[in-house]
Image: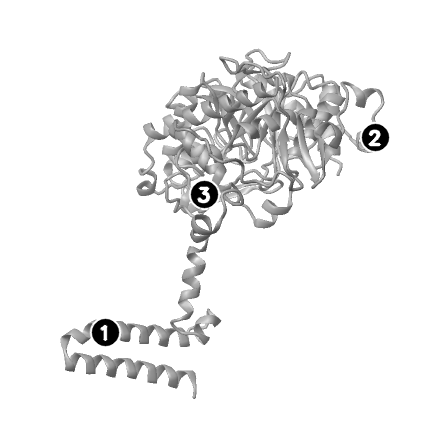
Amino acid sequence: MTRIAIVVLTLVAGVLASLAAAWLSPWWLLVAVPVMLLALLGGWDLLQRRHSVLRNYPVLGHARFLMERIRPELQQYFIERNYDGRPFDRDVRSIVYERAKGTDAEEPYGTERDVYEPGHEFLVPSMAPQPVPKEPPRVRIGGSDCARPYDMALLNVSAMSFGSLSANAVLALNGGAAAGGFAQDTGEGGLSEYHLRPGGDLVWEIGTGYFGCRTRDGDFDPAEFSDKAAHDHIKCVSLKLSQGAKPGIGGVLPGAKVNAEIARVRDVPEGRTVVSPPYHRVFSTPRELVRFIARMRELSGGKPAGFKLCVGSRRQFLAVCKAMLEEGTAPDFIVVDGAEGGTGAAPLEFADHVGTPLTEGLLTVHNALVGTGLRDRIRIGASGKIATGTDLVKRMVQGADYGNAARAMMFAVGCIQAQRCHTNTCPTGVTTQDPRRARALHVPDKTARVQRFQEATVASALQIMASMGVTDPAQLRPHMLRRRVDPVTERSYEELYEWLQPGQLLAEPPVSWAADWNAADPDHFTV
């Protein structure tokens, strides 16, 4: 029997059943109509050629697609344990939500984690804990070439662009930064009124598209950059080299999303697809990079200038260090983004398998700067899954001076980790340009949540450090963080990793660094 015959018989049976039901009693229509609709659906399933499952299992096959559609929600709310969700587990999300609401982020009965599992890390408490400082320390950003240094908070809002985030989300984040005295990175999507209106401190980031300071041909526009960088709310300027979740590739903003407002902010034509190339036009060698950072500082009127990257080749970063030494100038800060960092959208292969995780990235940058005698001039920011006080302390042990958080700040403004950031259907109005969805995000309430979260997280970090006998991040040392390497062995970071001495690469490079140091060329990005 052919499929067409089956379809015809199915439809005839459905129609006859409906007519019979209607003749017997009107009440039978309650049964007849659904039967007829299912018969029509079954007929369509048998004829369509897109889904093999539906051709073999008409009607019933739709249950499979329904379950697949709601699988993430079922997994998150009913199956995941408190400590094994990804990218952020329920325990971490709960801490952020509770701190943002101003309620106690405490749990009874002890840890649910296996402290004997290989990979488990813990901080070392002191037998002589110290009082918690009344005021959190700040990090002075700005070397000898900087005329207008900035005192950075220990935790700040990481790079997220207007366009990726809704206007209300940007307003809430910047309002929280203004209330709490910390900074917000604009992301590479340009400088919008929503970044400026609340009055929070800003790190203006420009990427390969030079949005907000570009010519019609897509080149860097120094005059527009200088004009905008002079704004009082902009405290630092940053050049984005690469992003942790997708290093080495650019981005695409579909023309349908480029409305008049986004076109104005990014200096691009309305309604046309915007492509961010994977490479910069303003430099092609380490030396040119260093010179351009110095130019950004000059154009901004002496404000701190730096760059952000996901670390790849150690040899290439050492080439940049050599360029700094030869040029006699250096960035005021470097933000290290880990491969575990977030993104609005990225190819799965890049998110999973390209780029250096934050721990190794920080250790590479910190040691390279120490070994070349540059560390005292340059501050290091850490970006990548920082959500708790413990995260912040760990990153400072590993070489960072301060931290930036993106997804944790999104949680503070209402994100529920639905992971629909790239679909424009964010259920909480955080990552959407749909006005109806975005209006659900109440700016005054979320502004207060951002401020409370940052304040409580920094306070937690200070409390942890005090329990370790430390009152200032500069006192943290590698031996204070330990990792279990097998069920019966644990080692400190001092033992697990190599730590260079000041100027060691200039004097006598250790064997493990010698090949990369000797091959590093300030005039070429040698792989």
Q: Badge 3 local density, few (<14 within 10 Å), some, or many (20+)?
A: many
User: Disc 2 designates what residue?
Assistant: 514
**Mark 2 or mark 3, earlier in chain:** 3
Q: Is residue 397 left or right of residue 370?
A: left
Q: Look at the numbered disc 3 and give the secondary structure of its residue.
A: loop
In which quadrant of the rendered view does residue 30 lie?
bottom left
Compared to 207, does 376 lie above or below?
above
Alpha carbon separation for disc pair 1 and 2: 80 Å
Image disc number at residue 31: 1
Query: Please, what is the three-letter code of the amino acid marked with disc 2?
Result: Ala
Q: Look at the numbered disc 1 and give the secondary structure of its residue.
A: helix
- Of residue 522 and residue 429, the one placed in the foreground of this image is 429
Locate the N terminus by quadrant: bottom left
User: Do callouts 1 and 2 mark residues in contact (Cβ within 8 Å)?
Assistant: no
Inspect this view and state whether residue 524 appears: no
Q: Residue sitting at 43 percent across and 38 percent down? A: 163
